[in-house]
Amino acid sequence: MPPPAWLTQALAVDYSEFVPLRAAARRFGWVRPEFAAVLARFPEVFRCESQRVSLVDSLATPAARTEALARVASWLRDEGFVTGWRDEPYEIYAEASGEPLARIERAAVKRFGIRGRAAHLNGIVETDAGPAMWVARRSATKPTDPGKLDNLVGGGVAAGLDAWQTLMKECREEAGLPFELARRARPRDALAFDYVVADGLDANEVEAFDLVLGADFEPRNEDGEVAGFERLPFDAVRERLEIPHLFTVDAALVAWSCLRRWEGRPL
């Protein structure tokens, strides 16, 4: 089962359109050249060159970098470069080593091409007609991808949490899954992928989980971020995945990976 053509195209990133963002020679993000010109307004924070943007050497600790990036992110918000402010810190890791370098407001992550971590859940139901999948529709008021189709549960991993803790929290908030049921979820995929968005680069590291649910289960959103749910046979999910950008990019990849994994296998 090949991935949908639109998804393959979305995941094909031309990194020559970006310049690397570094701290002490360790890359942790990607920025567009035009955004690098904006960052040049902060010479006390960034050293901007034609081939790279680096945090200045005097910002030598995670705490110092976090404080400096917070000042920049606040200015970017006030000037309209960053929208959808969450008041939620994300951890920044060096791409090669995984070393924690700093923290930054979640809304600024894509502007800086920083790799965000997330946990997603495929909700699977075995029916007499074959396996089905619960699909969520994002609220029209979501700051990112409003109204698009999504996995049953999905959420970004905030600083101080891991993927499992995030999943348990999001299961309750997004789908009304009690802990005793949610804890039966099983890790299935670790997906790393990037795609270009209007304000930069959406770099992702997603841990995907599967949870087999009873036929009588009905998800119930509790945080207002989901407009509704639909239980679809696998064939119907495949059909929707072929429609460009009906799903979010990350949810499409997680759902496609699930379908491929279960193809021809009993639940």
Image (tube, grey):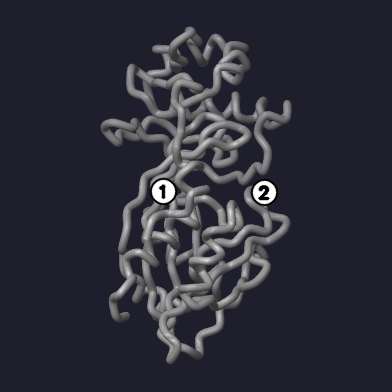
Say what secondary structure mark 2 lies in.
loop
Residue 50 — which label? none
Please report the residue visible at 30 percent of the width from the left and 74 percent of the height from the top.
Answer: 264
Specify few, some or many for label 1: CA neighbours under 10 Å numbering under 14, 14-19, or 20 or more: few
Residue placed under numbered mark 2 in the picture: 143
Q: Is residue 66 visible?
A: yes
Foreground pick, 124 / 242:
242
Q: Residue 218, image x and y in percent?
A: 55, 83
CA gap, disc 1 to disc 2? 23 Å
| 112 w.r.t. 150: above or below | above
| 223 w.r.t. 145: above or below | below
- Residue 37 position by quadrant: top right
Please report the residue visible at 58 percent of the width from the left and 68 percent of the height from the top.
Answer: 136
Q: Earlier in the sequence, mark 1 or mark 2?
A: 2
Q: Is residue 71 left or right of residue 31?
A: right
- Residue 1 position by quadrant: bottom left
Amino acid type of the residue that numbered disc 1 sits on in the rendered structure: Gly
Please report the residue visible at 45 percent of the width from the left and 73 percent of the height from the top.
Answer: 123
- Nearer to us: label 1 or label 2: 2
Amino acid type of the residue that numbered disc 2 sits on in the rendered structure: Pro
Foreground pick, 82 / 122:
122
Q: Residue 12, image x and y in percent?
A: 45, 37
- Tally the numbered discs: 2
Q: Residue 166, image x and y in percent?
A: 44, 59
Which image quarter holds the C terminus?
bottom left
Residue placed under numbered mark 1 in the picture: 160
Residue, far left: 97
Foreground pick, 235 / 34:
235
Q: Residue 266, image x and y in percent?
A: 29, 80
Say what secondary structure mark 1 lies in.
loop
Q: Is residue 109 visible?
A: no
